[in-house]
Image: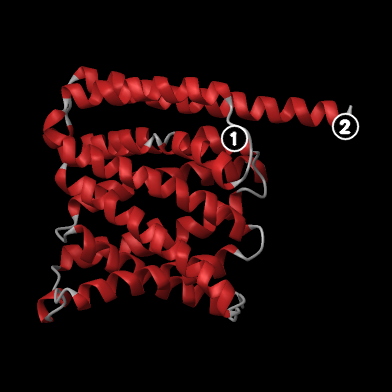
Amino acid sequence: MLSVKQGQYLHLHLIVFIWGFTAVLGALISLDAIPLVAYRMSFAAIFLFLFAILTKKRLRFSWKVQLKFAIAGLLIALHWLAFFGAVKVSNVSVTLAIMSTGAFFAAFLEPIFLKRKLIIYELAFGLLAMCGLALIFKVESQYTLGILLALGSSFLGACFTIYNAQLVKQYQAGSIGLFEMAYGALFVLCYLVLSGTISADFFVLSSRDWVYVLVLASVCTAYAFVASVHVMRWLSAYTVMLTVNLEPVYGILLGLWILGDAEHMQAEFYLGAALILLTVIANGILKLSKARKTRYETTG
């Protein structure tokens, strides 16, 4: 019989597996990146609204708080536009390998926004990650646009994470997710309307695409967002960090299994991806070890 903590650990692996599957769904759905994000965020907002009603989440906020949610919604929308754009012009493996650089963008952005000192070992790990990135560029130069879009998505994702971390301290995850998805969908839909892209054909999807879009919006977005916050009540930051770093591994393996030859890369690509991933894990281990030492010295 599993303990509650063991059950939540398996739950976390399921969530990370779902995140890894997101890129594969992006490749399977025939929509371009912009309408895909519009559908994803619109349906996710609907699912999160139903969840908020059932669980009686707070839905009324001042205009200043709404503005904060709108900024976060714009950031996550831009992040996903670049992410799915990268999947469309390259493949799942390239996109997820480059997305692993997000931790290092966060390491450089946090000192700017949170007013803390830059840590030397983070600079060293950042340089090692860039070596892995350079190796991927060298052997997969045909995917240059996809690599650049994935880098942009990784940067925007780091910005969103830092910004959203401040909101999570003040407001419930379900409420935050609902408004972020709604505002993000609104921004993308406004762009589509102003650009004259929306027509009757915009709402015509194949039955397969409808299934994939609904899975993407419900399971991979609404459920994963709320569940990822829920499991943190039982698991340490160390456990969560190490497990979340498996996302590109799960995603690349799923891509190889489901998408086949389109995901097979040269050996140097996997070496570069492994170098990025290992530096991210090492950075997290050092950071958490340092935090534990500081906490011990303070309480000891």
To which residue does mark 1 refer?
239
Circle 2 crowding by C-alpha within 10 Å: few under 14, some 14–19, many from 20: few
Asked which secondary structure carries label 1, the reply is helix
For the point 22% across and 46% down, the residue is 87
Asked which secondary structure carries label 2, the reply is helix
Residue 198: % across, % down:
16, 77
Spatial separation of the CA atoms under disc 1 and disc 2 = 22 Å
Q: Is residue 149 left or right of residue 62?
A: left
**Quadrant of the image occupied by residue 250:** top left
Circle 1 crowding by C-alpha within 10 Å: few under 14, some 14–19, many from 20: few
Amino acid under disc 1: Thr
For the point 29% across and 69% down, the residue is 188
Residue 156: % across, % down:
39, 49
In this view, 294 is above or below 77: above
Residue 105: % across, % down:
44, 38
**Quadrant of the image occupied by residue 144:** top left
For the point 15% across and 45% down, the residue is 89
Amino acid under disc 2: Thr
In this view, 74 is above or below 228: below
Residue 6 in sight from this viewpoint: yes
In this view, 190 is above or below 242: below
To which residue does mark 2 refer?
299
Front-most of residues 210 and 285: 285
Q: Quadrant of the C terminus?
A: top right
